[in-house]
Image (spheres, helix red, strand yellow):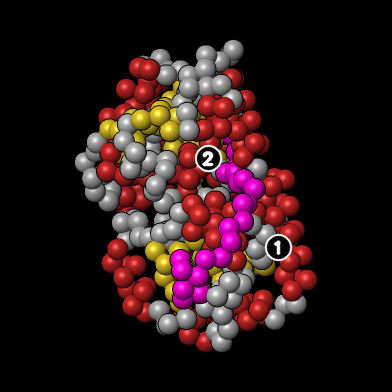
Amino acid sequence: MLGLRAPWGVEGGVEAAVAALAPRLVKAGHQVTVYCRTRYNPYGSCMREGVRLVDVDSVYGRASEAFVHTLLCAPRAAKDHDIVHLHACGPGLFAPIPRLLGRKTVVTLHGADWQREKWGPTARSVLRMGAEVAGRTADALVAVSAGLAAWGNRFGPGCVHIPNGVGAHLPVPWDSTVFPMLQPGRYHLFLGRLVPEKGLDLLVEAARTHRGDPIVITGGASHTDGWAARLRAAAPPKVIFTGSRFDLEKRMLLTHARSFVLPSRTEGMPLALLEAMAAGLPILGSGIPPVREALGETGQIVEGSAEAWARALEALEAWPEPERVARGEAGRQRALALFGWERAVDAHLDLYRRLVPDSAKNG
């Protein structure tokens, strides 16, 4: 697998998806290698959870590092593996390389990256080109949402809809020394990278008139340091930025939030949303198709302005506790029933076996 920064210790939906998928494929009997960009992998080249991590350096820069790294890794991966699985649109540009070397190639579209606001016109064009090259040349195209699958099916019937997965939430007791600025059950939570397409400007503006609980924004910038700094500077005190949090601290925030909020304008299939659903949190989400696909009828859609978000937050705080619990439980059951990682792993294994019958167990 390649195209990501590193599966552990890095924030990002692609990274989180591979961190969950790869060890489960190992448990199913396959050998899996993930090629990491050296700068981001805190563990170095090693075995972790049965997955072989291989560091390969890159030319680091906002628009170049994923392309250079994939170009360097694709021939190496094709030499040693039956299937080369590339993740994201940009790396999809190099899908022909493993095929030219006689290996099966899978590309997963984790989002319509060419629509992301952080990229300029040239980068957007290249990202869209990468997705189109993948659609035309990969042996299989995987889409994490129904909308992406519909886009991928323009290139033929080879596009497979496999949503991102989620595991059962493991609650973590509250520790006031970790988050002394918060009270359990008295904050609304956003998890994700600080990038323009997440709609965080709406939450910051809503907080100016919202009279209730604070809004906690957890995550770091992704080649958007200037934009993130301006967001923080514009935020009123009611908005609390925690920076990136992982593992126990992230689970603690999910365990004790009053709700989860996702005002995104662009998503693939948001893992943070699925995690919040699995944690039994009531959800306020934007009306974009991937959010609606995840929520079904279990969450509340908020359309439009910052004023609409402020009203939705205040209305949710007025819900009686039984209603809040019931709505959260409905989302939890939906997340585990429709988006459990077991389903995603089985779907990937079926796909791999179709590409390599009686699959030699190298990934």
Amino acid type at image mark 1: Gly
The mark total stands at 2
Q: Nearer the viewer, residue 117 or 166?
A: 166
Would you say residue 237 is visible in this rendering?
A: yes
Q: Nearer the viewer, residue 133 or 235?
A: 235
Q: Quadrant of the N terminus?
A: top left
Q: Position of residue 46 (x, y in %)?
A: 36, 30
CA separation in Å, label 2 and label 1: 23 Å
Q: Which residues are magenta?
A: 158-182
Q: At 50% across and 42% down in the image, what residue appears?
A: 17
Q: Position of residue 211 (x, y in %)?
A: 56, 87
Is residue 269 left or right of 293 when viewed as pictured? left
Asked if residue 282 is positioned above or below residue 130 in the image, the reply reads below
How crowded pointer 2 is (Cα within 10 Å; few <14, some 14-19, many 20+) is rated as some
Is residue 194 left or right of 154 when viewed as pictured? left
Q: Residue furthest left?
A: 59
Q: Position of residue 295 (x, y in %)?
A: 67, 57
Q: Which residue is mark 2?
A: 20
Q: Which residue is mark 1?
A: 328
What number is the disc on residue 65?
A: none
Q: Is residue 168 magenta?
A: yes
Q: At 65% across and 43% down in the image, what residue appears?
A: 340
Q: At 39% across and 48% down in the image, what residue appears?
A: 10
Q: Nearer the viewer, residue 100 or 351?
A: 351
Find numbered disc 1 in the image and state the secondary structure of the residue it sits on: helix
